[in-house]
Amino acid sequence: MRFGLFGSAQAKRGGPDVDSGVGFREFVDYNVEAESLGFCSTFLVEHHFTGFGQISATLNLLTFIAARTKTLRLGTAVIVLPWHNPVLLAEQAATLDLLSQGRLDFGIGMGYRYREFAGFCMPMEEAAERFDESLAVILKAWTSDAPWSHRGKYWQFEEVVVEPPTAQKPHPPLWMGAGSPESITKVAEQGHQLLLDQYASIEEIGERIALFKSEVEKRGRAFDPMSVAVTRSINVVGTPAELQKAFETRIAARRRIDRLTLRPDGTNQKRVISDEAICAGALYGTPDAIAVKLEALREAGAEYVLLNSAGGPPSLRRFAREVRPTFADASTLEPA
């Protein structure tokens, strides 16, 4: 198995005595340490208008991380295409790919939080069409050397050559978040790589990987287990009381996200899951308990796991020292 990072940082808003950049700088240091511990990648979220300072300028923060690291793959999980001018986004992503010497993993999605779409004054009903059009423009931007034009429903460009070129050819790997059979099939059809969410049960993860593998092979391509990344929250704790507290914190954090997701009329309810489900998929507990869950994930077909350390750097260090050696590829055990 291979392991990377997944998650976010916080820039807290406050008065003149509050240094809002502390959370971002600590997050950069956290990624530098993760590379030294042998983690192979980091995938950052994109969110807006939350009120608790999540990462909004994902590529900017990844560029800073790129400057402080040497081998860490730099992923987005995910950039929400409907909100972005696709040509400007293609230029910014290509710049990061060049500066990092080809380390960008471009994770993309349609978005799901109502308050974010409302903040951009954009109907959620347009998300799928905007996503498809933006992706087509980005791919043309990255692969065209001659001037081209685009006149679509949402975007128009006239005789442009997008600069700079990407380091990776024909373009950085594309990762798409998906969960439903229809969306997983679409990822396979388009030849992209698959991101699976942190709340799905191990049984669901197994079913989704099996479906993706089948759809890839049905189209005459070899299935690479590393083309599927499974996100999981991790928290190494020692006592039942610590475990209970960790689960309570996780549930509260998820409920805060639910409030950003639901529309005023209560629709989009399918995103709301039970407390039990919120806890079941997490890798929480003693090192031995986490190892049992990881083994179940591996048996389900997961070989690439992205960890969001709810316990911060101490939890990640314990995982690296006490759990990871049992599961990691020998080539990834050497510090970077």
Image (tube, rainbow, N blue to C red):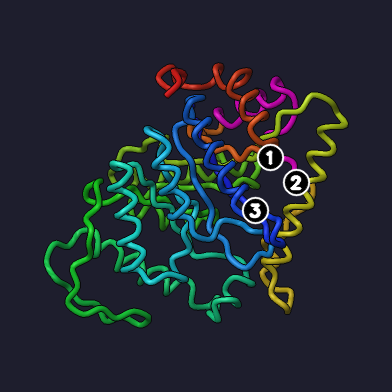
Which secondary structure is most common in the magenta stretch? helix
Instruction: Measuring from the top left, give residue 98's x and y in whole percent.
Output: 27, 48
| Residue indicated by mark 1 | 310
Instruction: Measuring from the top left, give residue 46's x and y in whole percent.
Output: 53, 58
| Residue indicated by mark 2 | 250
Q: In whole angstroms, how far apart are the C-alphas of marks 1 and 2? A: 8 Å
Instruction: Measuring from the top left, give residue 76's x and y in whole percent.
Output: 46, 51
Q: In whole angstroms, how far apart are the C-alphas of marks 3 and 2? A: 26 Å
In the image, which residues are magenta?
Answer: 278-299
Amino acid type, residue under disc 3 in the picture: Asp
| Residue indicated by mark 3 | 19
Q: Residues within 10 Å of mark 3 (few under 14, many from 20)?
A: few
- Whether residue 2 is visible: no
Q: Are marks 3 and 2 in contact (CB under 8 Å)?
A: no
Q: Residues within 10 Å of mark 2 (few under 14, many from 20)?
A: some
Q: Quadrant of the C terminus?
A: top left
Residue 155 falls left or right of residue 26 = left
